[in-house]
Every structure is written in structure tokens, then in C-alpha cells.
Image: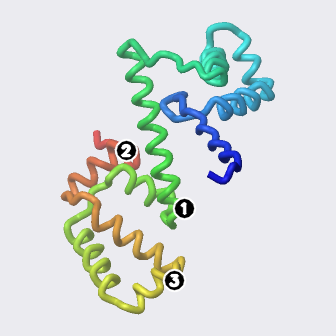
Amino acid sequence: MSGEPAPAPAPAPEPFLYHEGQPITASEAGRVRATLMGNPEFMKEALAGPTEANKKMAALWALERGIQLPPPTTVSEVEQQTLSRAERDQITHEETLRAAGFNELQAFEVANQRPLLPSEKKHYQRELERMIADQGFRARVLAKDREALAEFRKASVGAKLPTGSLDDIKAWEVAHGLVPAAK
């Protein structure tokens, strides 16, 4: 007790609120709202009455003031929120794969769990084992060599994909719109 004043306590962190299923702070909500207000097309829709844009502006206005709107109460609201979250997760997964060196088709196939033939999966598993056993390759990965990292990621992902027969693969391609369904 030297008579010095105690240091001021650190300010409490701004609490998280939720908007469209994602955490957001009141200040972030204000920034998003201000950005949207600068978009003439969005504001034209928002001012046109009970539209999605109008609901979004109302929700951001409330969040900016620290008011958390109630959760969805109807089955259709819950389903819409679930579908929106699943779509957002899918897009994020594909973007992450593209950033890791996968092309568009590869990212789509991996994100949607395209089955591999057992021989293809064994190839990826052997490649992964070879990479792990190779000290030179491990050193390249640890040194963050881009080519080595991309090669390792592709083998790792390939080793985790499900296996299936040629019929399973064909059915997957038809189900995902990559080939037309046989008539």
C-alpha cells in the first residue's frame, strides 16, 4: 500500500449478439447498417415495405442498440435459418479448399463428399504414408513449402473421402448435376 491509486480496471468486452446466426457486436451491427444505408438499391428495397431488406435493417438497428431480437418461433423460420447456415458453411468450406490449392471441381467434390474407388483411396493413403515417412518431405512441410503443403493437403483429404463403386460415383455425379440422369 504505497498510496498510489489503483490502476483503472480494463473495460469489459462488448457482448456478442447474434444476427443471421452469426455473432456480432453492437458496433459491428452499426457499421454494417451504415454500409447498407450507403447502398441506394438496398435502401430502395428496405424502404419499400415489409421486405427482407427492411427486416434486415430493423434487426441491425435493434442490435446496434444492444437489443437481441427473439429467436425464430415457427418451423419455417427455423428451417430457413438452418438452410442459410448450411449454405454458408458449404461456401466457406469450398473457399477454404480453393485457398489450399484445390481447383473448382476438386473443391466441389471434396465439400460434397464424392466417393472414391477403393483403389483411389488406397493410393491417397499410400501417398500420405510415404510423405509422413519421408524426412525431406516433412522438412519441406515444416518450412511451409507451398507445393509440399498442397500435396500433403490433397493426400490427406483424399485419404478421408468415402469409398464407393462406379455405380455410387455415377449416382453421386447425377445427384450433384455433373452428368445428366440416364433416361
Which residue is the site of mark 1?
Answer: 99
Horizontal side of 88 relative to 47 (left or right) equals left
Which residue is the site of mark 2?
Answer: 176
Which amino acid is tagged 1?
Answer: Ala
Q: Residues within 10 Å of mark 2 (few under 14, many from 20)?
A: some
Which residue is the site of mark 3?
Answer: 143
Q: Which residue is drawn at 38% across and 23% down?
A: 79
What colour scheme does the image use? rainbow
Question: Residue 155's x, y, as percent?
Answer: 35, 72
Q: How far apart are the alpha carbons under marks 2 and 3?
A: 38 Å
Which label is found at residue 47?
A: none
Quadrant of the snapshot with the C terminus: top left
Horizontal side of 109 relative to 167 (left or right) equals right
- Identify the secondary structure beneath mark 2: loop
Which amino acid is tagged 2?
Answer: His
Q: Residues within 10 Å of mark 3 (few under 14, many from 20)?
A: few
Of the image marks 3 and 1, the number of the one nearer the N terminus: 1
Please, is residue 152 above or below residue 21 in the view?
below
